[in-house]
Amino acid sequence: MREVNFDFDLIVVGAGYGGFDAAKHAAELGLKVAIVESREMGGTCVNRGCVPSKALLAASGKVREIADFKHLEGFGIHAAPVRFERSKIADHANNLVSNIRNNLTKTLERAGVTILRGKGRLEGPQTIALRESSGVDRTFKAKDVIIATGSDPFVPPGIEIDGRTVFTSDQAISLEWLPRWIAIIGSGYIGLEFADIYTALGCEVTMIEALERVMPTFDPDLTKIATRHLIDGRDIDARAGVLASKVSTGCPVKIELSDSKTRELVDQLEVDAVLVATGRTPTSKDLNLESVGVETNRGFIPIDDHMRVISNNKLVPNLWAVGDVTGKLMLAHTAAAQGTIAVENIVGKTRKIDYRSIPAATFTHPEISSVGLTEQDAKILALEEKFELGAVRSYFKANSKALAELESDGLMKLLFRKDTGEVLGAHIYGLHAADLIQEVSNAIARRQNVVELSSEVHTHPTLSEVVEMAYKQAVKQMTN
């Protein structure tokens, strides 16, 4: 049998957070590594997602805070009317993106990773073809290949995109202009975060949700309180159960709204702009996956918990996939964890991922976060494993730090087993919810129970006491 001469031990296709962490970790372990990227280093998160959007949320959040005269009066503070410069807010986001992208690139270079610029695709087992911007094709052999090509915004049929008056989050992060009236299609975390930004900067928002209620992916109890503050308490007209069946670009943008069930036309709108925030779709169609016999599921690459690619219930040798393209938890930190785990398995260690302990956050003002099971999924598990499910609520209005901040509208829901006390999930709405969820995430990762957690001492006065109170309430419900 002819011996194969490999150009690299590992080639990673895609330089987002999943690809970055995989390439960096592999190089640190002594592998000869190359990473392929056709667009900007850093992928969606750094260039078009979490990094620039959080910069915009930080700046617009300051505007909201200073402009909230009633809230400030509670402290005895009287502020002058707030003024801001849209272009400088946009520059803040752009500068942050540039800095992080440059730092990421330098980190890979220092680690000894070869950066290959161009579009990568599979050309059979252990083979990657690279099409450079000049049109030249090059082929490389690698012992292992990791696919980390991420995702792109999903645009439903009937919606025209021009990038200026009708756009996705990819274009929205540039904040090129502030529409007087903008419609946001979708009320998931992307739609909510941009509604937070736009309303803080003085825009009127109409939120269009095809499902029966706004914020359909969030815990229903949290949705009730969050809706009052994030939607009803702002200049937002939220419409649920309607479909944006047709969106035409122009001045104004024309929207046809149809009933989600009957598909009958129910209304027409004319707005200044439309943001399409209807989820994301995997970037996999140009990978030539058929060359290694891989069939996708709606474009997502099937993997096991070791990040090995699966085809027809069989493992594909030496092929791995991480990040959004796998369709698991489509979060940057999930992709990073998957990338590290894939490399650990490549070098002979055995590691699996624990999706239940990975937290998620929506960076509105206040924030929303969650980890573990939803209440519905926890109820199903309770029936399957024959245990009684416990659920307690801990309120920010009983927390001294939240009261001191005049930010006491918040709620934490904790889900746990009443027999063993094991923490199954948590959902938080309130001040710094994205930070608070990490404590529960750690508890779920270690499969800890509320009895031992309730005895841990929390700093007073801090918001972390909201979590402490939930643990203590849960102990009182224990059946053993």
Image (tube, helix red, strand yellow):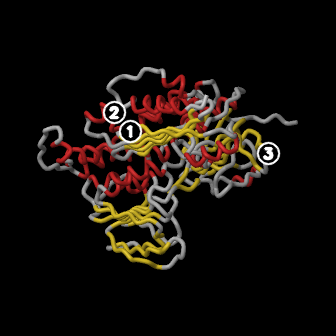
**Residue 55 in view here:** no
Q: Check if mark 1's residue and mark 2's residue have beta carbons within 8 Å.
A: yes
Quarter holding the N terminus is top right
Residue 235 in picture, x, y percent from top left: 28, 60
Q: Residues within 10 Å of mark 2 (few under 14, many from 20)?
A: many
Element carrying mark 3: strand
The residue under the point 37% across, 47% down is: 364
Numbered label attached to residue 395: 1
Of badges 3 and 1, nearer the viewer stands 1
Distance of mark 3 from mark 2, alpha carbons?
52 Å
Element carrying mark 2: loop
Quadrant position of residue 34? top right
Going from N to C along the chain, the mark reached first, 3 or 1, is 3
| Residue kind at label 1, given as amino acid type | Tyr
Residue 78 in picture, x, y percent from top left: 11, 43
Going from N to C along the chain, the mark reached first, 3 or 2, is 3
Which residue occupies the foreground of this view, 126 or 199? Answer: 199
Q: Which residue is mark 2?
A: 399
Numbered label attached to residue 472: none
The residue under the point 29% across, 40% down is: 407
Of badges 3 and 2, nearer the viewer stands 2
Quarter holding the C terminus is top right
Which residue occupies the foreground of this view, 216 or 395? Answer: 395
Element carrying mark 1: strand
| Residue kind at label 3, given as amino acid type | Lys
Q: Which residue is mark 3?
A: 314
Q: How many numbered markers are drawn?
A: 3
The residue under the point 65% across, 58% down is: 298
Residue 72 in picture, x, y percent from top left: 18, 42
Residue 148 in picture, x, y percent from top left: 59, 44
Which residue occupies the foreground of this view, 19 or 306? Answer: 306
Q: Residue furthest bottom?
A: 265
